[in-house]
Image (tube, grey):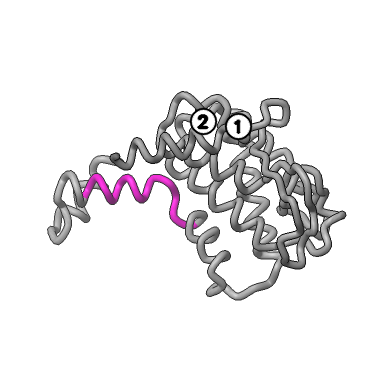
């Protein structure tokens, strides 16, 4: 079985937990699994599973789920705390059923975990997103960055590094590098400094 077949099989299995009404992935948590952020049990709509499924669909270009992925992303973005005066601005709760204010301790890493998926979508799938959704995702990523900065952690903190890295180096840099090095073989030549500038001028 090749990697493409395995991915399709995994996505098909995951999609069985999709709730069409809420545009989110579900999971059943029979018991409290530990940790200090939440003790939610029962049937829940999982924010992280939803954004990871949508990201996988778009990056793997699985068109059969694309429209659902767009709906999932729109839902996820709507669940982010977007109140700039809020202590939890830029965060998401773990589950649809548990508001941030009800969590025992909001997880500030959650902004980075969800934000990295949204950043990857903007980086790799930006031109294929519906315009309104793209704008919403860009705003959500901006909110994540503001949340991370507000946390006042050092720049070497792993989660902060990934968010700031994707902000500093735009989505055009990686494709340009791949084109110049892999396809045009301009690495280790003087042309790497000259041709890209000529083409963009």
Of 136 and 97, the residue lying toward us: 97
**Residue 111, image x, y percentages:** 65, 56
Asked if residue 21 is among those painted magenta in the image, a careful observer would answer: no
Which span is picked out in magenta? Answer: 168-180
Question: Quarter of the image holding residue 155?
Answer: bottom right
Q: Is residue 107 above or below residue 68?
A: below
Residue at position x 24%, y 45% from top?
179
Residue at mark 1: 133
* Secondary-structure class at tag 2: loop
Is 171 magenta? The answer is yes
- Tell me where residue 77 appears, x and y as whole percent: 67, 40
Q: Dots 2 and 1: beta carbons under 8 Å?
A: yes
Q: Residue at x 40, y 39 (%)?
A: 7
Whether residue 43 sits left or right of residue 135 in the image: it is right
Residue to which mark 2 is pinned: 129
* CA gap, disc 2 and disc 1: 7 Å
> In the rendered view, would you say 194 is above or below 5?
below
Question: Residue 177, how many percent across, how many down?
Answer: 28, 51
**x 20%, y 52%: residue:** 181
């Amino acid at each position: 079985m090749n990697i493409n077949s395995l991915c399709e099989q995994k996505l098909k299995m995951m999609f069985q937990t999709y709730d069409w009404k809420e545009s989110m992935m579900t999971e059943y948590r029979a018991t409290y699994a530990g940790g200090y952020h939440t003790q939610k049990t029962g049937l829940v709509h999982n924010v992280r599973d939803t954004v990871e499924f949508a990201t996988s669909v778009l990056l793997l270009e699985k068109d059969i789920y694309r429209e659902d992925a767009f709906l999932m992303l729109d839902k996820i973005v709507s669940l982010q705390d977007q109140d700039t005066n809020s202590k939890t601005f830029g965060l998401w709760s773990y589950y649809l059923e548990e508001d941030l204010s009800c969590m025992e301790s909001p997880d500030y890493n959650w902004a980075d975990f969800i934000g990295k998926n949204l950043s990857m979508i903007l980086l790799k799938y930006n031109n294929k997103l519906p315009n309104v959704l793209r704008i919403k995702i860009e705003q959500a990523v901006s909110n994540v960055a503001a949340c991370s900065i507000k946390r006042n952690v050092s720049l070497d903190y792993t989660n902060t590094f990934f968010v700031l890295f994707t902000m500093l180096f735009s989505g055009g840099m990686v494709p340009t590098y791949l084109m110049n090095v892999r396809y045009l073989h301009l690495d280790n030549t003087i042309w790497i400094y000259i041709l890209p500038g000529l083409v963009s001028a």
